[in-house]
Amino acid sequence: MTWTLITQSFAVLRKDQRLVIFPILSALGAMALAIPYIWVLTGAAPWQPSDLHWSGPSTWMWLFLWYSTSSFVIIFFNCAMAACAQVRFSGGEPSIADGIRQASRRAGSIFLWAMATSTVGVVIRVVEERAGWIGRIVAAIFGIGWSLATYLIVPVLVLEDLDVMGSIRRSGALLKKTWGEQLVAGVHFFWIILLLAIPGVILGVLALPVGILYFVTLAAVVTAARQIFVVALYRFAVSGEAPDGYSREALGGFFQSR
């Protein structure tokens, strides 16, 4: 049943291929943002060989800011795409500018969420590295729970007028309806990436630039399809209505089975 939903997500994307631009903008934005941070941390331009100068707390502060602002860029464009997917599901014709405008209205909350999720990520990493095998187990369990509880936070952030804490609670409440679908869909998207990566490896061996282009395209398409799926799941959890392009049987059957 989840495979059906994933297939329908790719079908929706095929009808509005412009949505692929958002993962591309996200990647370009993150790469552009990396340039000043690398310059500050190494004292040289990113394209010049140099070592990272570890200078104590200030370096860790810059690394955390880099992590947080990169997260902001990625989440911002995910929110923009979620806004466009919402318009598409409502029968409208979204534009790239519409999505960016909607995400811009929520830029403050998106930034605070980027800071929050970056902090949690750093804490989990520190626990994993310094608390032994018990800490790694605890960190893994908490990380999985945190990822599931916040799985729907992107559409909540951009589509509902809630602050960050309210968005986290709202996503957690929707989790009670959708946790199985989220978990299984995440695994299925992972296997799709692995399966479709095989031609890319072959192309990379034959012609490296072609292989790189293939993987860039694959990453953009799968990311866009996954975000469309998240918005569809959010809409069904909120309204009980299957979005345009999805079958109620595929969505409703799974929810009714719990």
Image: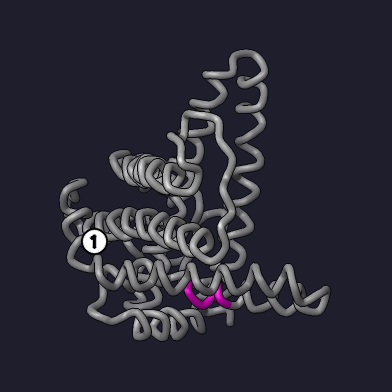
Whether residue 12 is situated above or below residue 60 in the rendered picture = above
What kind of residue is marked 1?
Ala
Q: Which quadrant of the figure contains the N terminus?
A: bottom right
Q: Assess disc 1: are there few (<14), some (14-19) or many (≥20) residues with their C-alpha within 10 Å of its C-alpha.
A: many
Whether residue 122 is situated above or below residue 79 in the rendered picture = below
The residue at the point 41 percent across, 70 percent down is 115
The number of callouts visible is 1
Q: In this image, 47 relative to 72: left or right? A: right
For this rendering, which residue is in front, 70 or 80? Answer: 70
The answer to whether residue 247 shows anywhere in this view is: no
The residue at the point 20 percent across, 56 percent down is 91
The residue at the point 52 percent across, 71 percent down is 253
Q: Which quadrant of the figure contains the C terminus?
A: bottom right
Q: In this image, 201 relative to 78: left or right? A: right
- What span is colored magenta in the figure? 146-150
Q: Main secondary structure of the magenta part?
A: helix
Q: Quadrant of residue 212?
A: top right
Residue 90 percent across, percent down from the top left? 22, 61
Residue 143 percent across, percent down from the top left? 62, 73
On the image, numbered disc 1 is attached to which residue? 103
Say what secondary structure mark 1 lies in: helix
Decide whether residue 156 is among the magenta residues: no
